[in-house]
Amino acid sequence: MIDLRLQIDPLPISEPIVVRLQDEPAACETEHDAILVERDGARLEYDYNGFSLGVHQRENESFAGDVILAFPGQRTAHRLIRSASPHNTFLVTEQCDQLCMMCSQPPKKLHADLFSQFAVAATLAPPNAMIGLSGGEPLLHKGRLFEMIEIVASLRPDIRFHILSNGQHLSADDVPRLVSIGTERILWGIPLYAADGAVHDQIVGKDGAFEKVQSGLAILMKAGASVELRTVAMRQNKDRLAELADFLFTRLSYIDVWAIMQMERIGYGRMNWSTLFHDSSTDFSGIAKAIDVSTARGLSVALYNFPLCSVPTPYRHYALSTISDWKRKYLEICDKCGSRAACGGFFEWYSHNEGFAALGTI
Ligand code: SF4
C-alpha cells in the first residue's frame, strides 16, 4: 500500500498550504513550486519561496511533480497528487446525508472547507489529469464545489473531474452552470442499487433517496452530462440486477456506462461484510444475467473491482482494473499468474478468509 501521507518538518504557517515538489529548477513554474536543494539521508530539503521545507522519504521514492497539502504545525502532509499516478482523488468533505450499508468512508459531522486549496492543487496537476472528487457527499457543498471547478476550468481547461455523488442535490437551476462548466469536464459517478425504490432506500439508509436520485439524474441528462451509473453487487440486490438493467434501458439509457462493482472491506463495508458480501466467484448468475440484458439492449456495462479469475471466462473482458494503485494488492496465488498485468487485484483490506472462495476455478 502506498501511504498518501508524507512526513514533513512542521511549518510555521497560519493557513493550510499547497506545495508542488520539484527536483529541477527548470520545472518550477509557479509560486507554489518548491525546489529540492539538499538530500540528507532520508530527509529532503526544499526551498519554498525562500523558506525551508523538510520532507522525509520512507523509501527511495521520487516526489517530483507531486502536490502536497500541509497544515499549520503538523508533521504529516497529504499527498494530494502523485504526478506519476492516474489515481488522484480529493476527499472534499466527510459529511454525507446517507448511511450506506457498505460505505467505505463513513460520514463525519464536521466539514473543513479546503476547496480553495483543492483548486490550487488541481491547477498544479500534470497535463490532462482526471482528478477524483469524493466524500462524503460533495454536492452538500455544491456552491463551493462548482466555484472550485470553474476556477480550475478557467486556468487549466485540460483537467477533468470524476465526481462521486449521490446525485440528490442538483436542481433545475444548475443546468446552465453545468453546461457552462463544460459537460466534457466532469464524469458523474452516481450510485443506484435497485430498480425498486424500497430496496435502494434501504441500502443507502435514507427514505426517499430513490426518488431524489431519479430527479438528479434527470437534471444531469438535461445538462448533457456524462454519467457512470454505479451499483455495488451485494446479497441484498444480486438477484435484482437484471431488473435494474431493464430499468436503466427504459429510463436511463443515456448513461455512458453501468458499472457493477464489488465491495470494499473497509468502513461499514467491513462491519457488515458477513451480511452484505456477495461471493460472485461462486455465484455469478445474477451479474451474468444483468450483463446479458444490458448488452442485448446496447447499454455499455463494466465490472469494477472484480479480480479477473473471480469472473467466468466469457465475462472477463468486462472486468476493468479499477482499484487505485495506492490501495491495490495481489495475493500469493497471483505471483505466477499470466493475467496479472490486466487484473486489478484486490483492495489492500481484502481478507481472503472471508473473500472469493472460487478464485481461478471458473
Ligand atoms: S492476478 Fe491474481 S487475482 Fe488476478 S487473475 Fe491472476 S491470480 Fe487471479
Image (tube, helix red, strand yellow):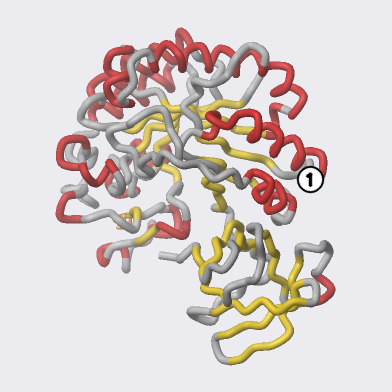
Amino acid type, label 1: Arg
**Residue 294 percent location from the top left of the image:** 41, 20
State which quadrant residue 73 falls in: bottom right
Above/below status of 280 relative to 49: above
From the viewer's perspective, tell me whether residue 100 is left or right of residue 341. left
**In this image, 340 relative to 275: left or right?**
right
Extreme residue in the top direction:
250
Secondary structure under the numbered disc 1 in the rendered image? loop
Q: Is residue 197 above or below residue 111?
A: above
Taking 120 as reference, is 189 left or right? left
Seen at 56% across and 48% down, the residue is 90
Residue at horizontal 33%, vertical 12%? Answer: 197
Question: Residue at left 55%, top 65%?
Answer: 77
Q: Residue at x 32, y 40 (%)?
A: 262
User: Is residue 270 or residue 51 the one in the foreground?
Assistant: 51
Mark 1 = which residue?
156
Image quadrant in which the C terminus is located: top left
Figure check: 287 above or below 21? above
